[in-house]
Image (cartoon, rainbow, N blue to C red):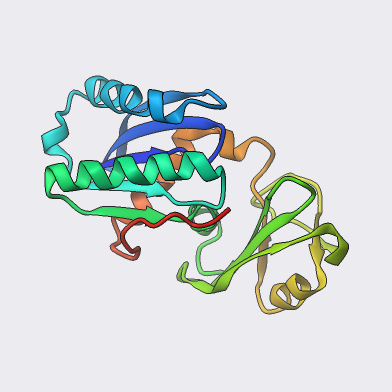
């Protein structure tokens, strides 16, 4: 299976081609652009296809991150994924940024539930718990700083500092064995993110893409 993966959920705009048969990321193209995702995305899609030596018509599935993240960027990525899927007659699959991070943690610590904590900017946090199979446990939460209390150590998967968590998150964390936050700059490592995204959607566990409100 050939997967075209798209990530526009942050300041970066990236596209990659992944071969599920060989487990290899064939090509990745993109840049940290801040703005202008709509103008640059298809350029990066074309570049990724060219470097991989594959044609758009060979793509079997399209994967796209659906947030949380940049409101405008997510909608650009989702619209592009849906348009390509319609033109190719192939499925498009949406995966939340939190799911991608959780899957990366599961690859490092298999068989353990995970609580993912991401910086939501404005001194807020996004967090969501996942069971040992990678399935989300409840909806994603966003907590303002006034509700923060306590701190939990990060699991050995990351060398980052302890993560301050709100009290409801502490209760969720008490039911999980692993609390994992990606190390600084993780989300800016597009090759890692797109590889995990592509591998994740090959398992047929995710729905058609719909933006996840930031």
Residue at the image position 51 percent from the left and 59 percent from the top? 106
Q: Nearer the viewer, residue 147 or 181?
A: 147
Front residue of 94 and 108 = 94
**Total numbered labels placed on residues in the image:** 0
**Left or right of 78 on screen, residue 138:** right
Instruction: Give how far across and how far down residue 154 sits, in percent.
Output: 74, 56
21 versus 34 height, above or below: below
Q: Residue at image x 67%, y 79%?
A: 175
**x and y percentages locating residue 62 in the rendered image:** 27, 46
Between 90 and 48, the residue placed more toward the observer is 90
Q: Residue at x 22, y 41 (%)?
A: 84
Residue 155's quadrant in the figure? bottom right
State the image quarter where residue 5 is shown: top left
Residue 28 visible (yes or no) = yes
Query: In terms of depth relative to the viewer, which is nearer, 63 or 152?
Result: 63
The image position of residue 180, as x and y in percent, is: 66, 57
Position of residue 197 in the picture relative to residue 22 (left or right): right
Residue 189, percent across and down? 54, 33
Horizontal placement of 204 versus 28: left or right?
left
Whether residue 148 is visible, yes or no, is no
Q: Residue at x 26, y 20 (%)?
A: 51
- Residue 7 vertical position relative to residue 168 in the rendered view, above or below: above
């Amino acid at each position: 299976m050939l997967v075209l993966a798209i990530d526009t959920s942050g300041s970066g705009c990236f596209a990659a081609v992944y071969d599920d048969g060989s487990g290899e990321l064939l090509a990745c193209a993109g840049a940290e652009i801040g703005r202008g995702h709509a103008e640059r995305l298809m350029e990066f899609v074309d570049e990724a296809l060219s470097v991989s030596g594959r044609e758009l018509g060979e793509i079997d599935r399209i994967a796209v991150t659906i947030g949380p993240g940049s409101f405008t960027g997510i909608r650009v990525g989702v619209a592009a994924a849906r348009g390509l899927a319609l033109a190719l007659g192939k499925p498009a699959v949406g995966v939340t940024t939190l799911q991608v991070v959780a899957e990366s943690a599961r690859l490092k610590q298999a068989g353990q539930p995970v609580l993912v904590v991401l910086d939501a900017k404005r001194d807020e946090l996004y967090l969501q718990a996942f069971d040992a199979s990678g399935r989300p446990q409840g909806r994603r939460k966003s907590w303002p700083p006034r509700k923060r209390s306590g701190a939990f150590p990060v699991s050995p998967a990351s060398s980052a500092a302890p993560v301050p968590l709100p009290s409801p998150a502490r209760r969720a964390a008490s039911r999980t064995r692993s609390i994992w936050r990606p190390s600084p700059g993780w989300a800016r490592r597009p090759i890692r993110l797109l590889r995990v995204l592509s591998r994740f959607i090959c398992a047929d566990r995710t729905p058609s893409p719909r933006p996840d409100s930031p």
